[in-house]
Each structure stands twice: as C-alpha cells, then as structure tokens.
Amino acid sequence: MESHFWQNWAGCASARPTRLAAPATVAELSDEITRAAAEGLHVKCIGAGHSFTPVAVTDGVQISLDNLTGIQSVIPVEPSGALVTVLAGTRLNELNPTLWSLGLAMTNLGDIDVQSIAGAISTGTHGTGARFGGLATQVRGLQIVLADGSVVNCSAEENAELFNAARLGLGALGVIASMTLLCEPAYAMRAVEAPARLSETMERIDEHANGVDHFEFYWFPHTDRVLTKHNTRLPGNTPLTPVNKIRGYVDDELLSNTLFEGVNRFATRFPAAIPRINNVSSRALSAREFTDRNYAVFASPRRVRFREMEYAIPAEALPETLREIDGWLQKSDFRVAFPVEVRFAAADDVWLSTANGRDSAYIAVHQYHRRDHTEYFNAVESIARAVDGRPHWGKLHSRTAADLQPTYAHFDEFRSVRDKYDPARVFDNAYLRQVLG
C-alpha cells in the first residue's frame, strides 16, 4: 500500500501511515474504524498537529477530522449559559467567534487557538486562572466511536466510567466525534501587560495569581525580568478598546514573531550572547492595556517554531521550583533565549488532568527548533519531578507509566476502562505504550 508522510507543527514527531481518511459524517468515521480494525491496522486522529509528543503518530490509518466541524446544537441553561454540542474537528479559532455571535464563550482557553477542540481537550489544554479549570472541565458529554465501530454517547449520567476517562483520554479509548460543552455568557477581558522583576513578582505571587481572573507571566532566563499579564473578566457588552493595528503589529508580529525569529537564529550561532539578548528583549516589550473579546485576549500568534515541555506542580511549590531552574541555568553552560511561561489552574476531578486533585502552577520551557533542547528539558524535568510534577500530555517529556501511576489517583481506573473499550488496542501507538503501559 502507498505510504504517506506526516509531521507535527514543531517537526519533532512524524509518521508514515498506510492510509489517510477524512470522513465527513459520523457514519463514515465509524466505517473507517471498522475497516481498520478488520485489517489489523491501528487508528489515530490528527487535528492541527500542535502536540509536541508523538500522541497522534500511527503506522496504520490516520484520520483527519477536518471535515467534521461546526456547532450541532445549542441548548440554553440557567443562568443564561448554554450546552453547546460541537463536532470534534472544529478549530478553536473558528469556534470562539461563532460562540461570541451566539452570546456565549468558553470559560477558559489556552494561548494558542489553532487546535481542534477534540485534540485540545484530549491532551489537556488548560489555559490560566487560579479559580478556573482546564478545557476538559467544561465537557458535559461526548459522542465516541469505539474500536468496533459502535457510536456511544457518554456523560456523568450515561456510561459514566467511559466519560470520566475519555474527557481527557489521549485518544486511547476511541475517536471523539462530537462533544457537548457548558458555555457561559460572552465576556470581554481587560488585559494589563507590564514588565516587572521576577523577584518582586514572586514576593507577591499569591496576590497576583488570586487577585485577578487570569494571571500569567513570562520570565526571561539569565535575567531577573518578567512580562506579567493580568486579565480581568468584564460583561460581554463592555465597550471594546483593542490594541490598535500599528501597536499590535509592532508587539505581536514584529517583536514577538519576525524579530524574535531573527534573534533565535542569531542566538543559535552565538549562544554566549543570549543573556545580553534576553536583557534587551525583556525591555523591548513595554506596558500596554486594552479590552477585547475574551478569546482575542487569551490567544497570541505563534509563528516562531519551537519545542516545548510543560510541568504542572503544586501551586505552593512554584517559588522554590523557579529558584532551582534559575540556579541550574547559572551553574550550567546552557543558554536559552525563549521565555519561561508560568500559568495557574484550579484543582479538578478529571482523571488524567494534570491539575487533578490539587491547585496547580504550570511551568513551560521552550527551545528554538534549530537548537537541541535535551539538556535543558532533562534538568527542568528532574527539578519538577522532585515536587511531584506532572507533565503535559501533549508536550515533550520522558515519563513512563511506571512513574506516572503514583501521581494520578485514577490512573489504574483509566487503564481498566481502556482494557474494556479497546482490548485489541486499535487506538494504540508507541507513545501510549510509554505513558499507559
């Protein structure tokens, strides 16, 4: 059979599936899975390819859900929110404007919006906000195509064990065809972005994280400088004052993408210059304040390619963990030009959520795709593991089922549900064998 080549956005995972499929209906999706299982082929779905891990890699049938898009139904619920059923391949950057037109919004979002809704939720996209859970906490129902081609609905009331596992299921249980999300009334956000010092920010970290709806900051390694982002939720009818086009181009395109690409190319050739570069870069982004639709504030364009690892740690362990990372950078010869991103999430009850059972801080480290990330990521992973850190399922890490099992209270339950619904491992691949056993 003809072989096809696929790779993810970052270029760090690739596959040669034997067959490609792009079903346009749930019935066609069911037929593709039934056929693959009969032929003894594995099945994996792809969305935007924004996972850094090989979670979507397959040697069998690769299914694109790009033809399964759009909102199927909207059912109002009190107080003035709605249950929105959306097909799994719908991209977030298409869903969010449509929700706004309906007077609705997602409760929380990540900082990239090109993913499919199913891919984002299945790998644990979380956003930021100490009072808010990740995207999976907004799921109220799923329609899943199982390994035998059957189409099953699940929720907290119907097929509850499947629902508990599949709302963050890593694609290990079946293929999500659609999902029902609890959406809330549309809201605007006031964004206040400002440079600050890392030491001062950490002295008041609880005040920052808990004193505003959605807080995050970027730390420039080899410096004491950060860029803080305080985002406050406002009623949906609030007059909007978005960033003007010229300022937006300078900050979000010229500085954060075009110039940043050039900086990283230079740093690749001359890594010793990175501390000085970071000092200059951290001062180039000046303070700004604006009010816009929620999704326009959450997401930023990312055109500089990189590799990423992200760890969820207990929120109270954040100060010491950052000190350890800073200490390692000072002692090592390693230089990194990419900022370290720090975000927050409330404890939740999703079985494989990185915030399951505990309020969490997220530390995301990045490396330019032309430079080796191994030494840096290994060091940060070791530091995060020392405080029982949990790796983001869609970002690079070296963890295995043996050392992940102790940190997840429902890990064995998840694996039991997997055994029940996919005993022949139709949806298996090397990554799932690594992290699930």
Image (spheres, rainbow, N blue to C red):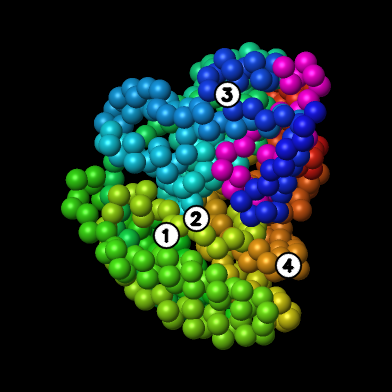
Task: From the image, tell me which residue sits under label 3.
Answer: 23
Q: Nearer the viewer, residue 120 or 362?
A: 120
Asked if residue 415 can be seen in this view, the reply is: yes
Number of the label disc, if any, that sits on residue 372 = 4
Q: Is residue 274 above or below residue 230?
A: below
Q: Is residue 110 above or below residue 25?
A: below
Number of the label disc, if any, that sits on residue 344 = 2
Q: Nearer the viewer, mark 2 or mark 3?
A: 3
Q: Amino acid at mark 3?
A: Pro
Q: Residue at x 52, y 38 (%)?
A: 116
The span from disc 4 to disc 1 (Cα, nearest Å) is: 30 Å
Magenta span of residues: 35-59
Q: Nearer the viewer, mark 2 or mark 4?
A: 4
The span from disc 2 to disc 3 (Cα, nearest Å) is: 37 Å
Instruction: Say which label, 2 or 4, has the lower sequence index.
Output: 2
Horizontal side of 224 relative to 242 (left or right) equals: right
Residue 51 shown in magenta: yes
Q: Residue at x 47, y 34 (%)?
A: 90
Q: Amino acid at mark 1?
A: Phe
Q: Provide residue 340's location: percent of width, then percent of height.
A: 56, 67
Task: From the image, tell me which residue sits under label 1.
Answer: 215
Dominant SS of magenta comes to: loop
Instruction: Say which label, 4 or 1, has the lower sequence index.
Output: 1
Q: Provide residue 92's location: percent of width, then percent of height.
A: 45, 41
Given contact means CB atoms under 8 Å apart, are the residues at marks 2 and 1 in contact?
yes
**Mark 3 falls on what kind of element?**
loop
**Mark 2 falls on what kind of element?**
strand
